[in-house]
Amino acid sequence: MTIQWYPGHMTKAKRMIEEALKLVDGVLEVVDARVPVSSRNPDLLELTTKPRIMVLTKIDLADPAKTKQWLDFWQSQGEKAVGVNLLQGQGVGRLRGLVARSFSGLKRLPRLLVVGIPNVGKSALINALTRRRGAQVGARPGVTRGKQWLSGRGMLLLDSPGILWPKFEDQETAKRLAAVAAIRDEVLDQTELAFWLLAWFSQHYPEALQARYGSLDAQNPLEEIGRRRGCLLSGGEVDLHQAAALVLKDFRSGRLGAVTLDHSPSEVQGCKDWKDT
Ligand SMILES: Nc1nc2c(ncn2[C@@H]2O[C@H](COP(=O)(O)OP(=O)(O)OP(=O)(O)O)[C@@H](O)[C@H]2O)c(=O)[nH]1
Ligand SMILES: [Mg+2]
């Protein structure tokens, strides 16, 4: 399975983010807590030196111990980082406090751009901060015509979130991103992805697999799951596509438990900077 990303999209996304960055005082960098390293994009550092706050979303779906380790690690590196569960609004108040402290020197409300790779929760974050669905507070003078600002109580957010391109040099990272649906399902083989995810779970969280599906055939767990769940073709054969979709859905919705696919900082050898991971 080879996952590709298209340079054309990347160039366009980069240009849009560069334009948006000119208008703001800082950045809310949105990262999925299940892939806190893989869902960051190191190119962001080259695009701006403006202050940024990392927002780890979906902490309800991630391993709490690993989330804490990553937050502690980044804070020890002088980064600002906070974990949130946007379905329940957990951590949003802490984020507001962090924004207030970080930009207390400004005489006006800080203007922030929300950036992140696809599906990490940028829109959900904006809605949580503005407490409205895409409410516009009108264009401010002095910024590019057509740009709208959303009021987030104590901050202004640019209406168009910056979609960073997923960055992966290796296929392992690509699969982790695909598993959390940061890469569109159409661009990769779902069956292979489910096979990989099941193998990953049997190595790292075997008890979670057992709890959800019972004891599995180590040789072909996907077929076993499909048979048990009645994912069958008309001839009685297991429909592996359907079984794969079921496994991916179980994982993405947290029915396989709260897990983190990336290593924790202590597991990463010689980890000095997140870029090395
Ligand atoms: N469980 C859980 N789900 C979340 C959380 N935050 C966002 N989601 C879900 O994640 C999915 C993606 O959220 P969006 O806000 O659309 O993500 P996005 O980054 O704006 O996505 P794009 O616009 O496609 O790049 C949605 O189904 C949200 O409900 C969270 O903290 N916990
Ligand atoms: Mg969005």
Image (tube, helix red, strand yellow):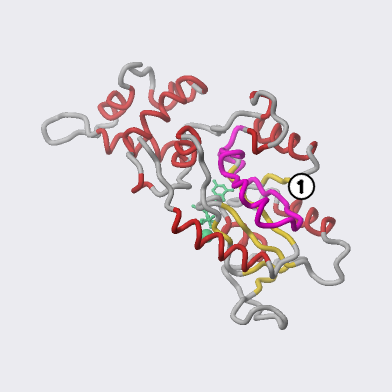
The percent position of residue 64, horizontal first and vertical second, equals: 64, 33
Q: Which quarter of the figure is the N terminus placed in?
A: top left
The residue under the point 73% across, 60% down is 26
The residue under the point 67% across, 64% down is 21
**Within the magenta stretch, is there residue 38?**
yes
Tell me if I can see residue 124 in this picture.
yes
The residue under the point 61% across, 39% down is 36
Quadrant of the rendered image containing residue 226:
top left
Q: Can you say whether 62 is above or below 206 in the image?
A: below
Query: What residue did someone put label 1 on?
Result: 80
**Within the magenta stretch, is there residue 48?**
yes
Magenta stretch in the rendered image: 34-63
The percent position of residue 178, horizontal first and vertical second, equals: 44, 41
Q: Can you say whether 196 is above or below 188 in the image?
A: above
The amino acid type, in three-letter code, at marker 1 is Lys
Tell me if I can see residue 153 in this picture.
no
Q: Nearer the viewer, residue 234 or 109?
A: 109
Q: Which quarter of the figure is the C terminus placed in?
A: top right
The percent position of residue 186, horizontal first and vertical second, equals: 34, 48
